[in-house]
Image (cartoon, rainbow, N blue to C red):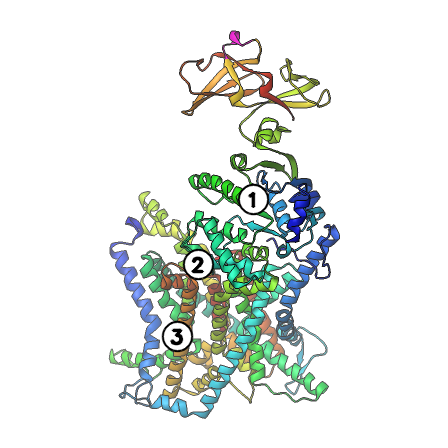
Amino acid sequence: MSDRGDHQVSEQIAAVKLTAITKRFGSVVAVDNVDLEIADGEFFALLGPSGCGKTTTLRMVAGLEFPTEGSLKIFGDEAGTLPPNKRPVNTVFQDYALFPHMTVEANVAFGLKMQRVAKQEIAGRVQEAISLVRLEGLEQRRSQQLSGGQRQRVALARALVNRPKVLLLDEPLGALDLKLRQEMQGELKALQREVGITFVFVTHDQEEALTMADRIGVMNEGELLQVGTPAEIYEHPVNRFVANFIGQTNLLDASVVSNDTVCLANGVHIPGKSDLPVGTRVAVCLRPERAGMHPPEEVPADQQSVVGRLESVTYLGNALVYTVVLGWARLEVRRENQPGGYRPHVGEEVAVSWTLDAISVVRA
Amino acid sequence: MSSTVQPRGTTKIALTAHSWLVYLFFFAPIFVLIVFSFSDDRNVGRWGGFTLEWYQDFVEHSQLQNAVWVSVRVALLSTVISVVLGTLAALALERFKFRGRKVFDALLYLPIIIPDVTMAVMMLLFFAEFFDILESVFGWDAQKGLGSITISHIAFNISFVSVVVRARLAGMSEVLEEAALDLYATRWKTFRYVTFPQIVPGVAGGALLALTLSLDDVVITQFAAGPGATTLPVFVFGLIRRGVTPLINATSVLMLAASVILVALSLAFQQFSGRGGRPSLRAARQAVSAPSTTNTQIKEGINQ
Amino acid sequence: MTMVADRPEWLEEAAVATPEFEKAAERAASRRGFLLSLPAYAYLVLFFAVPLGIVMIYSFATRNRFGGTDLSGWNLDAYRKLGEPIVRDILFRSLWLAILTTLICLVVAYPFAYFIATRTPLVRNLMLVFVMIPFWTNFLVRNYAWRVLLGNDGLFTNISEALGLGERELLFTTSAVVIGLVYGFLPFMVLPLYASIERIDLSLVEASRDLYASGFQTFRRVLLPLSMPGVIAGSILVFVPSLGAYVTPEILGGAKTTLLGSYIVTQFLTARNWPVGASLSFVLMAVMLVATLVYFRTGGRNL
């Protein structure tokens, strides 16, 4: 357990540290020069559309793929060229990859058996892991006799029983139906807190990432675009892709006029902070729930606004979504369904408004 | 199943009758053969009361007994070797990329699709040349026999085993092997504890197919056999050309029984491997739908 | 197909990954694959590819006066001989019998396969098992069974005599050979046909009937086109072995019905004209290869 001592000495050592990692498959660049640090004890999500390189990144950490270039450290030790069976990480695979010819118990014990752990210890730790994921009584079942949720728990127990330094999860909830998925989100989070191990999971579901992760890394086309807490990513996306991928958003084309002014595509100058050079093409990101709506002549003085025609109203029950058409853009405004208030009719002129802190200026 | 899909009326009656006739066509000759193998009459088509005489003849016929043992030895030996080589080949082709893979893949398919007569000719000419070389280089005067038969049977059985095992491997997710590696297994242990247990049914299926094909073959064996040794089918084939006798009836019935036992075994194996579900049904379905069957079809068909 | 990257044994300690390492790892995996394939590869080269090459060489050789073969001075004489009337007759007869056998199998197997495919799963599987049994049983024995049935004191003849049809000698005729071939290869037609019919969404048949198609129209316009892959696969599976048949004509056929397979064997065992036998074997293999390519093209592999 010397490594454990190591990491007490310095709390700063990252659980996983990627430096300039690149993976090419022939001429295809799957992961492009990625730098990433994941702290010890973190619940980290790699988020992106399919084919963005997130799974390849995870597989490189697991050792199932070797990086073409770059350094990959696990708790300070270079591990980029180690085979998977020599890395202190374990994986929960997408479809769980439970060994169909083994019982739940044998599946969970597999890793310990391969490490030649003493028999008694195996028995104890397997029991412990099985009760951790609340599967007591199912030890002798085979994976085909388990439900999707139970299989996932077995996969978790099979990985956690080895006490990995980092647990990797590849779309851990992808195979479950919606209700079970929501249930498992909370459970995974609680489990992570209980065991205190660094969890790195890959998902294409932004809601899942926002709900569970401490920090999120957003990837697209092999590049890591932004790393931050869910709030940072949601509120201050670095570019159009991130803004669009995380949650619903309105993006208004604009260009930078000064460090606190941008010019919208309709020629109107509005306040908008950015540190981008003058003339840069940007987008003003306005989340539907942060937009206000007023009759054109009643916009509060401290708010900016644009005027358009109400095209449609979508009734969601707890909220209403108004689609407003401007000559040069289309905006969505989401209002909580509360009694009273302003309820314009389709075809009316309305002003969509916002306060300065409701918007962010992102690279186009 | 509903309404119009089910044939009705006269169509249904016609189809049902037709199916019974097909089964009659399939089984009547076999049934007649079995019955007359117990007939106490030198004329094979006439019933002369029950006897086991012909079976006793079979047991006492030393040439037949020799042929049986040659067959069994060739079948077992060629099966064991082709199962090992075929399984390795299947693993290489399903799990690795390597130079020469495509050529190997094509070479592995050829013995399945080549006509029996062509392969028989190949073996005849090959052993003629090969033995010439052996004699002139090593001064070893080799003769065709058990060895040459076994070599030729392995040459076609490797392909069938590898096809069956490959089908099984293709159906097995590679992620299972990755999971084992992730759980600290070495490559060998991954094979030993994960891959192998998963492909056992395929290996067993391949072995049974190899046994069947080896025990069935006439044409190739005829050209690879020498004065030293001959297999049961080739010996019986020789007898049949000279005429029909009750002894051949009895021998045929025993060969039939061996085939049926092998089918039963293979069905049982597939039943064993098909976890869950109703076993016998699964087995039957697999037997028909598995890719291996298609190739059995090709081989069995082309074999004759 | 992603492969678990392989790590060369010689790199023991962990290091920063480099393109060279990645290449080395790929090479190691490739070597491992090659080594696994090597035993079977070597075996098939020695005992299959080389023999095939020898047959090819022989097909270009010349028969000498003593019945031996001269390998020097390659020529096409053996292939030219294929155009001679005797050989041509045999080729056409074999072709004709193979086509006839295929057609009979198709006509018999189609309704049978359709009937199986429309049964309940339980009955269907039972019926299939009873197709599988003859399919797996010894081919020689199955041919022999017909020899017993058709023999001059066989059951068939006895029945025919009893019915007053007179002594009908079927054995050693072309009909007997066709019966034997159909008997031998019918399962090869039934199984792919069944597989392709079973795959058809049979509600299409209902839809067709609903749209006023008659039973025959439904068969011709809906069922048959959709089951075409099975028809093609089954036909090839029957046609190809029928063309090269040797055992069946030897057991059930007569001297007047020499077929390709027997002719080739004769060239080697009695006539001792090895070049002609070799060239005919090659032609037979070429037909087989073409048919197999067609088979794979039509997706027969998945049946």
Q: Quadrant of residue B78?
A: bottom right
State the CA–CA distance, disc 3 to disc 2: 28 Å
State the CA–CA distance, disc 2 to disc 1: 62 Å
Please, which chain is the residue tagged with disc 3 on? B
Q: Which residue is mark 1?
A: A196
State the CA–CA distance, disc 3 to disc 1: 61 Å
Q: In the image, is residue B295 part of the stretch drawn in magenta?
A: no
Q: Are marks 2 and 1 in contact (CB under 8 Å)?
A: no
Could you tell me if residue B92 is visible in this image?
no
Tell me which segment is drawn in magenta.
Answer: A294-300
Q: Which residue is mark 2?
A: C231
Mark 2: give few (<14), some (14-19) or many (20+) Cα within 10 Å: many
Q: Amino acid at mark 1?
A: Gly
Mark 3: give few (<14), some (14-19) or many (20+) Cα within 10 Å: some
Q: Are marks 3 and 2 on the same chain?
A: no
| A96 with respect to A218 (left or right) | left
